[in-house]
Amino acid sequence: MEYEKIKQLMEDMGNSKITSINIDFPDGTKISMKKETTQEIQTIISEQKQSTESNSKVEKYIEKQEENTNKNVMKSPMVGTFYLKPSPTSEPYVEIGKDVKKGDTLCIIEAMKLMNEIESEFDGKIKEILVKDGEPVEYGAPLFIIE
């Protein structure tokens, strides 16, 4: 089978609702194609769910911030992936209720394969951790509430 015909067959399958096809030609050539669309849909739904959860946490944080002005908020200084631990088997840097001082390491944000330690800007006690370990964060996103 010619390359152009195979290419056309792939495009036709991509545009159709068919998820898999197996063709055996008389000359012994076999073509097998399979689309995996369910995984893509699950990934999109999962990402939307995480985004919705993060947005609701931010909204709750804003409401709480308006109620209590004596709380300090640590915000992300960069875009990246948030980690509470220096390695998967290590203990977290901080936990809810732990006292921290200005300059103490609170977490790591991985950006472009670089691990950036994020230090506390305030003295106080960790009241709330607003991001889950391994979640992506945006610049300026609230990470911790410190009383």
Image: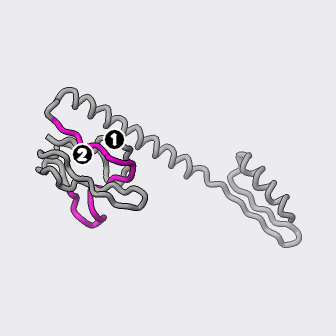
Q: Amino acid at mark 1?
A: Gly
Quarter of the image for residue 26 reads bottom right
Task: Pinpoint residue 133: horizontal percent, then vertical percent.
Answer: 31, 53
Question: Which residues, given as a range, are shown in magenta?
Answer: 71-93
Crowdedness of circle 1 by 10 Å Cα count: few (<14), some, many (20+)? Answer: few
Residue 129, which numbered label?
2
Q: Tell me the colour scheme of the image.
A: one colour
Judge from the rendering whether residue 106 lies leftward or rightward of residue 111; answer left or right.
left
Task: Pinpoint residue 140: horizontal percent, then vertical percent.
Answer: 33, 41
Which mark's residue is nearer the viewer, 2 or 1?
A: 1
Predominant secondary structure, magenta span: loop
> Furthest residue to the bottom?
28
Q: Quadrant of the N terminus?
A: bottom right
Q: Residue at x 31, y 49 (%)?
A: 132
Does 55 lie within the magenta span? no
Task: Pinpoint residue 91: horizontal percent, then vertical percent.
Answer: 21, 62
SS type, badge 1: loop
Q: Amino acid at mark 2?
A: Ile
3D distance between C-alphas at marks 2 and 1: 15 Å
Q: Quadrant of the C terminus?
A: top left
Task: Pinpoint residue 71: horizontal percent, then vertical percent.
Answer: 16, 36
SS type, badge 2: strand
Judge from the rendering whether residue 6 lies leftward or rightward of residue 62; answer left or right.
right
Q: Residue at x 81, y 54 (%)?
A: 8
Residue 140, which numbered label?
1
Q: Residue at x 40, y 43 (%)?
A: 50
Q: Nearer the viewer, residue 147 or 31?
A: 147
Ranked by sequence position, the earlier of labels 2 and 1 is 2
**In the picture shown, does residue 11 fall above or below 61?**
below
